[in-house]
Amino acid sequence: MTAAEAIPRLHRVKRITYPSNGERSVLIEGPPCGIGHEASSLYVVACLRAAGQSPNSMYQQLLAVSLLLDWASHSGINVEQRTGSCNLFTRAEVLSLKDALRTDMRPDRRGHVVSPSHFVARCLAVKDYVVWHTENAIFRMRSDDVRRTQSSQILDNFIAMITTGLPTAQSGEREGLDEEVQELFLQAIHPESPLNPFQEQHRVRNYALLLLYWEKGSRRGENLKIKVSDLYLVGDNPKAQVRAHHDDPLDTRRIEPRVKTNERDLDISEKLRAAIEAWLGARTKYPRSKKCPYLFISRTGSPLAADTVNDMFRLLRSRVKGLPADLVTHHLRHSANDRFSDYAEAAGMDEAEERLVRNYMFGWNKNSSQGERYSRRSTRKKAQKAALAMQSKLVEGGNA
């Protein structure tokens, strides 16, 4: 599917790190001469950062705003003048803007459209940006100024136009992996397996990392933020601590992984402890390994990037027959939730205890209902089991 027109890119989003404290942020650079865009920088500082958004979330928000600015430049529109005067956009302009937001801007996809969920996220990000600046203009008006009511109505009309007709968000249908597929995954990632698709020098590292994802159901960024000092491998209860380490000056990754869940301690199995200990031994052979505090490092001794994890799963998907074509870390998170559901049922946990323990293990707030989303496969199997039992009773009753 192709978009109507590809608008020239004049603005770009840049990630920045403050050297004094390692804090990450973002800004838009644009004409003239690639200087920072003032209105969007104010939005980042006073709105996005003040709301506690992560640098990665702010980056995605500004990508949409940069598309708004590109569209406006192409259309001869001054966004700051429109929001400052509360004289926003006509219906035709909003339709044109939504067409621009639908366009995939990647070099190899120019002219195509983004996914429905991506398009919705862009529209909502632009809406939030325009609303924030316009509301500031309205708040500067005197309380008895008749323009306040008119401007508020204009803003409401814009919100309706930018959100009307957006694709409905679909509920995620991702489930945990079947037991046979999990066994295949564990076999394929083992360093000595003939199915292992990774370069030999990285197999021990990848095994420890991927086994940690599988066993604990970690989010992608969580394992990448574990430091060697977060490990407690001595004794009968080995643990790995999940800590945020946000804005760490020692984290040299261009895109810093983020821990989006609660900090917690992860009890690890003997199998996982052995894998991590083997990796710690192999890790010393990587250049500059002593200078990097993070557990998982690249071939150059830098903290391992999320893109490298993506590459691992891409190799597994393409080289190991029988693994899902869309396999990602979140499949392992769902699978770990399914295994916990089976354990909780076998242990006779009541619903309240199961929720409390699950939420701690996976880093959710104690009253969160996230586990219901992540244990869909286990719930479906229980429903099938109940349905079969009910059918059996009906058959027995009919034969009585």
Image (cartoon, rainbow, N blue to C red):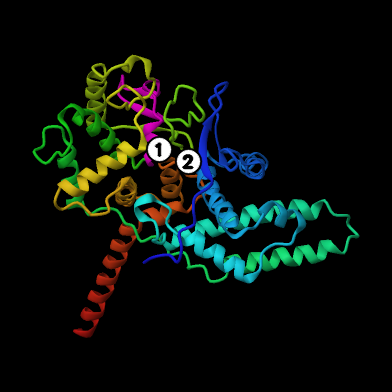
Picture disc at residue 371: none
> Counting other residues with Cα less than 10 Å from the Cα at mark 1, is it few (<14), some (14-19), or many (20 or more)?
some
- The picture places residue 36, in percent across and down from the top left corner, at 60, 38
Q: Is residue 326 left or right of residue 318?
A: right
Q: Which residue is tagged 2?
A: 260
- The picture places residue 48, in percent across and down from the top left corner, at 61, 43
Q: Residue at x 28, y 62 (%)?
A: 381
Looking at this view, name the residue that lies furthest to the right.
Answer: 144
| Residue in the foreground of this view, choosing between 127 and 341 | 127
Query: What are the residue bounds of the magenta stretch?
Result: 219-241
Examine the image and state in which quarter residue 208 appears: top left
> Counting other residues with Cα less than 10 Å from the Cα at mark 2, is it few (<14), some (14-19), or many (20 or more)?
some
Q: Is residue 344 left or right of residue 99?
A: left
Mark 2: amino acid = Lys
- Eyeballing the image, is 283 above or below 107? above
Q: Which residue is tagged 1?
A: 221
Q: Are marks 2 and 1 in contact (CB under 8 Å)?
A: yes
| Residue in the foreground of this view, choosing between 368 and 203 | 203
- Eyeballing the image, is 148 above or below 66? below
Secondary structure beneath label 1: helix
- Eyeballing the image, is 158 above or below 346? below
